């Protein structure tokens, strides 16, 4: 089954890399297009897939077509390719704010649409992708797309109304986590640790903490309490984080992310 990507930027690259790394599809069953020849050359060299500057060629040759351009280009790209889209084809989108209703109106004909929101940890097989499907998509077709996306990590089927929340809690979230790791490393460097070593300690602490939540099933608050000895160093650090408004800052950032996504 041919998998096509219109747009070969960072997110598409993360998806392609994850799919290849986990053996979900071979490179010869994938094709990608992009408006910049330099991006196509890089994609072809890194992943070994077929590339072209012709979006219509990708649309016409793909069984599953991923629209991985920036949201502001969706209307333009759909107008370009809609005559090449077939009734039996699956259209997968990754754009926040572009609803199934909006997409169907732009195609101006019945189309099998699956919206998903991946994140960049897909590149190392540790992503999580929220997925929802239009009414014309069968359960078997949705399951198959989820299988392909599983090459990038976990998948979760959600209602469309929650997809903008998925953007804030996972799609954009790696940026928050990278900032947190960088800040932790800066703190360690300020106290004398070499930067490369500080990044390792901070990143592994975040990775291990995330695995504890996923594998133990314990509430994050319970796990936090397990680290906080009475009168100890951790509870003192937690006190300062609360004083500086860490929780509120994260919540407000996520709410701003959702609002921005809904209006794109």
Image (cartoon, rainbow, N blue to C red):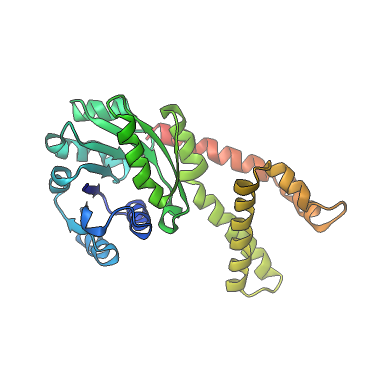
**93 left or right of 124?**
left
Above/below status of 263 relative to 36: above
**41 left or right of 94?**
left
Identify the residue at image location x=77%, y=50%.
Answer: 226
Image coordinates for residue 12, horizontal then vertical, percent = 32, 52
Identify the residue at image location x=27%, y=30%.
Answer: 103
Identify the residue at image location x=50%, y=40%.
Answer: 168
Q: Residue 39 falls in which quadrant of the image?
A: bottom left
* Residue 33 seen in render: no
Query: What is the tally of numbered marks visible in this picture?
Result: 0
Foreground residue, 207 or 52?
207
Image coordinates for residue 44, horizontal then vertical, percent = 23, 63
Image coordinates for residue 5, horizontal then vertical, percent = 25, 49
Foreground residue, 230 or 72?
230
**98 left or right of 183?**
left
Quadrant housing the C terminus: top left
Foreground residue, 75 or 127?
127
Above/below status of 82 relative to 59: above
* Residue 180 seen in render: yes
Q: Residue furthest right?
A: 231
Image coordinates for residue 199, horizontal then vertical, percent = 59, 67
Above/below status of 159 relative to 217: above
**138 left or right of 226?**
left
């Amino acid at each position: 089954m041919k998998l096509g990507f219109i747009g070969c930027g960072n997110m598409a690259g993360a998806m392609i890399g994850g799919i290849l790394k986990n053996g979900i599809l071979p490179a010869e069953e994938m094709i990608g297009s992009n408006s910049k020849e330099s991006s196509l050359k890089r994609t072809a060299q890194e992943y070994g897939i077929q590339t072209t500057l012709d979006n219509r060629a990708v649309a016409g040759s793909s069984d599953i077509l991923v629209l991985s351009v920036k949201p502001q280009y969706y209307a333009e790209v759909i107008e370009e390719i809609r005559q090449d889209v077939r009734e039996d084809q699956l259209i997968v989108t990754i754009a926040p704010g572009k609803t199934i209703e909006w997409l169907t109106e732009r195609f101006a004909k019945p189309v099998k649409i699956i919206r998903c929101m991946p994140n960049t940890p897909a590149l190392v097989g540790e992503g999580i992708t929220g997925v929802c499907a239009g009414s014309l998509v069968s359960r078997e077709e949705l399951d198959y797309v989820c299988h392909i996306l599983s090459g990038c990590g976990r998948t979760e089927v959600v209602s469309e109304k929650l997809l903008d929340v998925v953007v804030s809690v996972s799609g954009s979230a790696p940026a928050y986590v990278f900032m947190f790791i960088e800040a932790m490393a800066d703190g360690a460097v300020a106290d004398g640790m070499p930067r490369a070593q500080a990044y390792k300690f901070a990143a592994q602490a975040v990775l291990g903490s995330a695995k504890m939540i996923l594998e133990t099933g314990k509430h994050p608050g319970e796990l936090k309490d397990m680290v906080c000895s009475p009168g100890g160093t951790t509870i003192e650090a937690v006190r300062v984080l609360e004083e500086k408004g860490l929780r509120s800052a994260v919540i407000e950032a996520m709410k701003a992310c959702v609002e921005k996504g809904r209006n794109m």
